[in-house]
């Protein structure tokens, strides 16, 4: 005796690239962050970049014109740009997909280290709030520009290049210190000197006034 209900049995999906995807079995919402959710988009992309079927995923999304979510490392905006540059039929060609995807993701897959990265890599804390510099404390070249560690500290902290020579302030006793708060360029030292002279003049005038008051 059978219990035939007349329902069509569910057809099992054939194995394909989705079975090897890094996101397989994961929370799907993580791959559909709002475009304004930069950390969410970045996190989804990072998973895609290590996925063995990233290009397969990207090709599927491009061929089927998926407009939402992160697919194959591509954000919604990046896919929209590719839709404008190519016909949908172009994405049937694996070479076209590979070239388009790697061109769109070039800067993300090949990040250029920044001066901030160099600072984080080369500096280390010293007692008393001072900061040391690993390696040669002399000049170093960065993308065709020459810096000293103190110049680098100044630029990253102030947001602009130094005027003249960057030196330690007198109250910092640690020669190798590159703490941005412990250094100044020519302009800042001049401003500091002017402020000290004004303060000294005001103190002298106040002392003279008090002396005259006592004498009267």
Image (cartoon, rainbow, N blue to C red):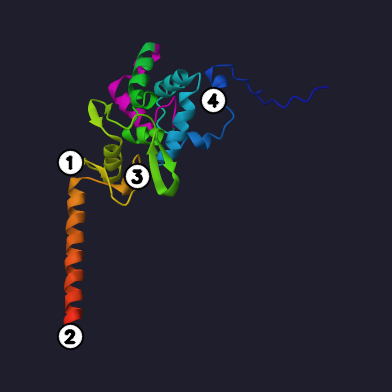
Instruction: Name the residue carrying label 1.
Output: 164
Say above or below: 151 vs 13.
Answer: below
Which label lies toward us, 4 or 1?
1
For residue 86, the mark is none
Whether the residues at callouts 3 and 2 have beta carbons within 8 Å, the answer is no
Asked if the residue under mark 1 is in contact with the one under mark 4, i.e. CB atoms within 8 Å, the reply is no
**Which structural element holds mark 3?**
loop
- Crowding near pointer 2: few (<14 within 10 Å), some, many (20+)? few
Label whose residue precedes the other's in the sequence (4 or 1): 4
List the residue tagged with mark 2: 215
The residues bearing labels 1 and 3 have C-alpha atoms spaced at a distance of: 18 Å
Q: Which mark is residue 22?
A: 4
Which residue is disc 3 drawn over? 179
Examine the structure image and report whether residue 86 is included in the region drawn in magenta.
yes
| 208 relative position to 32: left or right | left
Residue bounds of the magenta highlight:
70-94
Point out the tag, 2 or 4, that comes first from the N-terminus. Answer: 4
Task: Indicate the secondary structure of the residue bearing disc 1.
Answer: loop
Q: How crowded is mark 1: few (under 14 residues within 10 Å), some or many (20 or more)?
A: few
Is residue 35 found left or right of 199 in the rendered image?
right
């Amino acid at each position: 005796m059978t219990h035939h209900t007349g329902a069509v049995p569910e057809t099992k999906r054939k194995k394909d690239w989705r079975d090897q995807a890094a996101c397989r079995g994961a929370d799907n919402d993580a791959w559909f962050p709002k475009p304004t959710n930069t950390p969410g988009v970045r996190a989804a992309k990072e998973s895609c970049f290590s996925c063995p079927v990233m290009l397969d995923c990207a090709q599927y999304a491009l061929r089927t014109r998926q407009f939402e979510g992160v697919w194959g490392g591509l954000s919604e905006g990046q896919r929209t740009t590719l839709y404008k540059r190519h016909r949908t039929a172009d994405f049937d060609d694996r070479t076209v997909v590979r070239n388009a995807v790697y061109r769109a993701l070039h800067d993300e897959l090949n990040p250029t280290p920044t001066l901030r990265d160099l600072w984080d890599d080369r500096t280390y804390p010293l007692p008393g709030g001072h900061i040391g510099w690993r390696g040669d404390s002399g000049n170093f070249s960065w993308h065709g520009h020459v810096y000293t560690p103190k110049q680098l500290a100044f630029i990253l902290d102030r947001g602009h290049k130094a005027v003249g020579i960057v030196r330690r302030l007198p109250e910092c006793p640690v020669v190798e210190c590159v703490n941005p708060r412990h250094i100044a360029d020519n302009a800042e030292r001049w401003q500091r000197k002017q402020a000290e002279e004004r303060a000294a003049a005001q103190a002298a005038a106040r002392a003279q006034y008090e002396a005259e008051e006592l004498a009267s």
